[in-house]
Image (cartoon, rainbow, N blue to C red):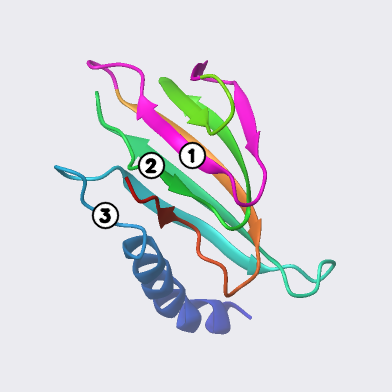
Amino acid sequence: MNVLRFCTAPFVALALVVSASAFAHEAGGPSEKVTVLQDQMLQNAPGKKAMMIEVDYKPGQSSIAHKHEGTAMAYVLSGAVTSQVKGEKERTYKAGEYWYEPAGSEHLVSKNASKTKPAKLLVFMVLSPDEKVLIPLEN
């Protein structure tokens, strides 16, 4: 069992790096750092997978406006993050606070609320394997 884990570890690491790079985008500067922590098919929900993603924002950094095809739940690990989903008011969440985004929600604002301190989010998503995690919105 340990031999199998040892042999597959490089492939899992490579898959995570490739998955994380799929979220990279440019919006007038470097984007937030996105790390895929887990990407797993769900046995109790056929045709769906769960993803756990860590999003690191440098001071003052923001994401481009986007939508997710899957359902997303976000939890602020550190710092403070300002978020706005279409049809809702902009709100700043502090470490320990969280929010829910139904599938297809348009995420208009997602940014570090501080210009001097970093912020970190943990995002859990449920989606179909063929659905995109992030789709940039047209202006």
- Mark 3–mark 2 Cα distance, whole angstroms, equals 11 Å
- Residue annotated with mark 3: 25
Q: Are marks 2 and 1 in contact (CB under 8 Å)?
A: yes
Write the start and end of the magenta stretch as one range. 90-117
Of the numbered discs 3 and 1, the one sitting upstream in the chain is 3
- Which circle marks residue 107 in the picture? 1
The residue under the point 54% across, 83% down is 3
Where residue 63 sits, quadrant-wise, is: top left
**Apparent side of residue 106 relative to residue 57 in the rendered image (left or right):** right
Which amino acid type is shown beneath numbered disc 2? Ala
The residue under the point 36% across, 29% down is 111
The residue under the point 48% across, 39% down is 107
- Residue annotated with mark 2: 65
**Apparent side of residue 29 relative to residue 100 in the rendered image (left or right):** left
Of the numbered discs 2 and 1, the one sitting upstream in the chain is 2
Q: Relative to 80, does residue 44 appear above or below in the rendering?
A: below
